[in-house]
Each structure stands twice: as structure tokens, then as C-alpha cells.
Image (cartoon, rainbow, N blue to C red):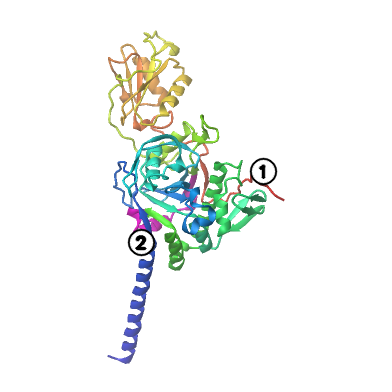
Amino acid sequence: MPLWLKVTTAVVSVILIGGLAFAGYWYIRLQSNISSSALGAGNSRTDTTDDATGRLQILILGSDTRDGKNSNYGSTEDSTGYGNSDVMMLMDISEDNKRVNVISFPRDLLVDIPKCTDQKTGKQYPARTGIMINEAMKEAGIGCAVDTVNKLTGMEVDHFMMADFNAVKELSNAVGGVEVCISDAVFDPDSRLRLPKGKSQVKGEQALAYLRTRHAFGDGGDLGRIKAQQGFLSSLTRKIKDDGTLSDPVKMLTIADVVTKNLTVDNGLSSVPAMITIGNRLKSIDVSKVAFVAVPTVPATNDPNRLEAAQPAASQLFAALRKDVDLTDPEGKQSPSPSATPKPSTSATPSATPKPTKPAAPYDKTLQPVTVANGSAVPARTQEIVEALAAGGFTQVGQLEAEPTAKTMVYYGADFADVAADVAALFGIPASQVAPSPGIAGVQIYLGADFASGTKFGKTTVPKDIVNQTAKEATCQTANPELIVQ
């Protein structure tokens, strides 16, 4: 063998061996960093999503646990059990990898928590009503938070990622700081956040204080905090995209090392290849199609210091998400609806059932008996449709509980065909879904899963101004007047 070929062979061999050793080292290192936990808490779910090609929903949680590296932020008594979720966001990646929705859930939002089983101990916890959403994982673990979000939204979370306080500090350091903006100079003595007016670069402890503060923004409540967190994530997304981080192996390894050291994921995401799959799906998404949203809320009826979902806006948002509507362009293409036909609902006891009145020609709408049977599986829909009927002149409206069904129908009794046609026209329900039924007194609109949002059939209603911002937009947060400093 010629000397030059021997030298070349030796060099190539060294490079290959070195490359394999390097790759093996990082694979083992990153894999050993990853901690995992069960995805659910014993509630039924289907696991059919292909992470590489299907629509994907990942619940992102920030834990308030105070052990280990987090002990500087309080004692272990400050967070019992598995801890509360300090941050809760649902990242929804479209099947075509062209859109991402990030939906924030206020920690003070009162929700119904389903029955949950701690997957480590087997201990069962009963379902609870009117509990702050950030308490969902405290007793039965992260899986209970996942099941709670599934119950609230009607969707099905595929994976979760839970980070602690230390993750924010190290990640912000790894990217060289994140640019934020505020309307006035502010100091929050609780979180120790101090920022000048205008733009600043935050990292380390200051980045953590920015994300943790509950009082520095807006009126000092959780909604101002959410907008600030969304602004921070928007800025972080732009920086990673602009710096080419997702296509730079060295930068990616640095960030991956930081993230995996401070992250707990579900068992299905607890491998390096699985996490690379997620990263590959995100790297080419247009930042103008990364929409940051918050669940619409109002002060809770029983406790003004807490929040409850604002209706019908919250139900409209969840319905739009289930139909995979582009929130940045809600007039665009929507997914087709299911088509099974229900039977008229007659078994339940109606509330304020109107007495049948034989209509004259032309008839008086205020005298016509119309009932709403809600089979959409969205409780708030009943009131929404009742109000739309009243606005359309039908004021004698009753309500019926109904079995869930896929297809909306309008049923009518003898001599009420003309009324049924007008009710259908009011909501844009096609004539093929209007049918006579001898057991109906007057007219019944039986809502199905194909009409789970809005007041026009086949068209998902997206709440006005539901998108707080996209990742393309640089926003400046409003300072809490009580914490403004000179």
C-alpha cells in the first residue's frame, strides 16, 4: 500500500472513530440526563399519534418544587407532594408543521379535576370540582395535570415536559440572554425583579424573576404574568431562529444538555431520538404562525380572587383547537365534521318546557315552543344557542339534557314544519338535517359534535382577539402602576 494511502486511511479511521466516540458520548450523556414519568393518571386515552407526522400536543409545565437546586426559592413546605404547576401551557403542533398554538392556562383558573391514580404508589384520589388548575398534579403527579387539561379542553395531550426553576436560568444563559421590554421601570420585592424602562436583556436569576413575578405586570394579577411569559417565549423563539440554533449542532447540543438536565418528560418522550423528532418538526415553522393564546377567563362567581372560564369564548376556543383552526387566520380552511345521526331527545326532563302552540300563518315566533337538546359534549353550548334563539325572536325556549351525538338535527312535530325550517335557517343547518318526529312538541334542535362552537353551523367561531401575539411580534409589557420606580 502506498505511503500516502496508508496515511489517508489512518486519518479517516481516526476521524470516524473520533466521530463515533463523540456521538456516542453525547447520546449517552443526554439520555442519562432525561427523567421520565407516566403520561396519564389512569384515565382512558388512545395512543395513536405518530410524533413524526401527526398533529401533536405537548403540555409544558413549570414546577414550583423547592428541593435540590431549587431550594434557594423557598423551603420544601412551600410545595407539598409533587408540587404545583407554576406555569401551564399546551403546545399544539399542526400535522403539516406549519403552525403552532401555545395556550396558557392561568394558575388561578378553577376547573374540575378527574379521578386520578398516582402511577407510582397506586393510590387513588377522587374527582374534585372547582379546584385551581395548578393543584392538579400535587397529589397524583404530572399525569393528573395531563388528564385535567384533557377533560377541560376535550383534546388529548400526547406528551408533557416539566421544567423546574433551574431550567429557566441555565437555558437563558445558554442562549446569551433574552430581550424583554416594559413600559416603565419596575421593581418587585417578592420576585426581586428590577428592570429599567424599555428593552433589556435578561438571563440567569433575572430571567427567572421575570417569568416568576406575579405582580410586576398589568394589574398585578396572573393574566399580566401570562402575557409577559408569552412575550419572553416569543423573544426566545425569534432569537433561536435568527441565530440558526436549530441547524447548528454545537448550539443544539449545548441547549439539549441544559434542557435535559432540568426536564421531566413522559415515558413516550424519554429518549434522545424522540426529542430530536420534536425539534426537527419545530425548526422550519414560520414564527408568524406561532400563536400565543390565553384561556378566556372572568373572576369566579364564588371567589373573585380566582378565575373561571369565560363562556362562550372558552368553549369556542377549545372547539376551534379541536378542529385544528388556524388561530392567526380563522377564516381559513377547517376540518370536516362527523356525520352520525341522533335520535330526538325525549328521555330527560326539560327545564321550562314550553306548551305546544299551533302556529298560524304567518306565525308569531314568540309563541313557538323550541327546545335545545345539547349532545355536543360542550355544556356551555346550551346557553349560547338559547341566547341565539332569543335574539332570533324565539323566546319560548326550553332545555334538555341529551346523549352525545356526532350530527346536529332539527326535529319537529305536526304542523311545525315551517317553524323548524326557520330555526334551521337561523343557524345555517342544512335542510337534509331537518326531519319530522311525532314525539316532539314543537321544534327541537339537537346539537351534535359537528356544531360545538358558534351560532352558524359548519363554521367554527373563534373569539375576537384571542391571539395575544405571535412569535414574530416584539411586544412591550405594561408595568403594574403600584411597582413603578424612578
Residue displayed at 42% across by 56% down: 263
**Mark 2 vs mark 1: which is more N-terminal?**
2
| 140, 443: nearer the viewer | 140
Q: Mark 2: which amino acid?
A: Val
User: 387 and 148: which one is in front?
Assistant: 148
Among the 4 quarters of the image, the one containing residue 374: top left
Across the whole image, how many numbered discs are drawn on residues? 2
Q: Is residue 28 magenta?
A: no
Relative to the observer, which residue lies in front, 66 or 90? 66
Q: Which image quarter is the N terminus in?
A: bottom left
Is residue 176 visible to the viewer in this orientation of the structure?
yes
The relative height of residue 61 versus residue 304 in the rendered view (above or below) is below
The residue at which mark 2 appears reads as 272
Which stretch is magenta?
A: 266-292
Residue 303 vs 149, above or below: the answer is above
For label 1, the residue is 482
Camera-side residue of 224 and 100: 224
Q: Position of residue 291 (x, y in %)?
A: 48, 46
- Amino acid type at image mark 1: Glu
Q: Percent position (x, y) of residue 111?
A: 44, 36
Disc 2 packing (10 Å; few <14; some 14–19; many ≥20): some
